[in-house]
Amino acid sequence: CLPNRAAVSAGDYARQYVIDQGPVRLVMIDPAIDLSPKRTYADGTPEQAWLKAKIAEGKAAGQWIIVAYHKPCLTIGLHGCASSPQLSNLMIKLKVDLVITGHDHNYSRSFPLTGTVTSPVVATRSGIFPQGAGTVFATIGNGGHDPRTITGLPGWVAAASGTNFLPNSFGFLQVDASADRLVVNEVVTSGGQLADSFTITR
């Protein structure tokens, strides 16, 4: 239902597709969305094979890899894991640089993680870290609509904001990329005291 203004490089616009912008490959997918066919990106599915291929192409081209989709699994929001745990585990296994989701109307960002969704391992707590150290998961649901609480602050959470914490900060995620660094900042537009940023280097 949205106009295609994004210079899609490959795939099926508004379902699963790729946008290449300079040093960045953005892969947009639709796990657990009520469209036909409903995709899970679970092990052995055609959509997972497509996703793996697009990530591999971007890595071979030396691009930063960002994967974005609506429903997270690794989250501290009220919805809990609303997509496939296998998908998040795949993001970690393939060392995707950044995963961006929404759905939960709060803000949360992980440290770079290895391990699995059920047993996440914090690779580093530094705000500047080398590519490949781990995958960062960011839930950017604080655009302004119907803000909600967070359910807690497990050890893998680097930053968070909800109606019950910091107090709720509204904003958006800004990603700036060059050949040797990916700089990510949460830009707060109103509310709370949230301040969050990190840098991935090569």
Image (tube, helix red, strand yellow):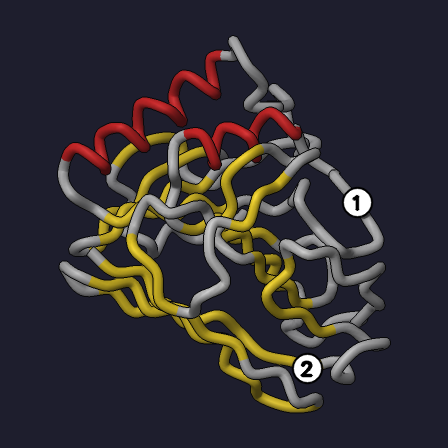
Q: Which residue is mark 2?
A: 169
Q: Residue at x 65, y 80 (%)?
A: 170
Position of residue 174 relative to residue 79, above or below, is below
Say which of 47 and 109 sits in front: 109
Q: Quadrant of residue 62?
A: top left
Q: Amino acid at mark 2?
A: Ser
Position of residue 25 relative to residue 58, above or below, is below
x and y percent of residue 20 in the render?
23, 47
Query: Does residue 62 appear to the left or right of 77 in the view shown?
Result: left
x and y percent of residue 101 in the render?
58, 51
In the structure shown, which secondary structural element does the residue marked by tag 2 occupy? strand
Q: Which residue is mark 1?
A: 80
Q: Amino acid at mark 1?
A: Gly
- Residue 131 in sight here: yes
Quadrant holding the C terminus: bottom left
Mark 1 neighbour class, 10 Å CA radius: few under 14, some 14 to 19, many 20 or more: some
**CA distance separating discs 1 and 2:** 20 Å
x and y percent of residue 29 in the render?
49, 37
Position of residue 53 relative to residue 188, above or below, is above
In the structure shown, which secondary structural element does the residue marked by tag 1 occupy? loop
Q: Residue furthest top?
A: 44
Q: Residue at x 33, y 54 (%)?
A: 6
Mark 1 vs 2, N-terminal side = 1
Say which of 56 and 13 sits in front: 56
Q: Quadrant of residue 67?
A: top left
Say which of 74 and 42 sits in front: 74
Q: How many marks can you see?
A: 2
Mark 2 neighbour class, 10 Å CA radius: few under 14, some 14 to 19, many 20 or more: many
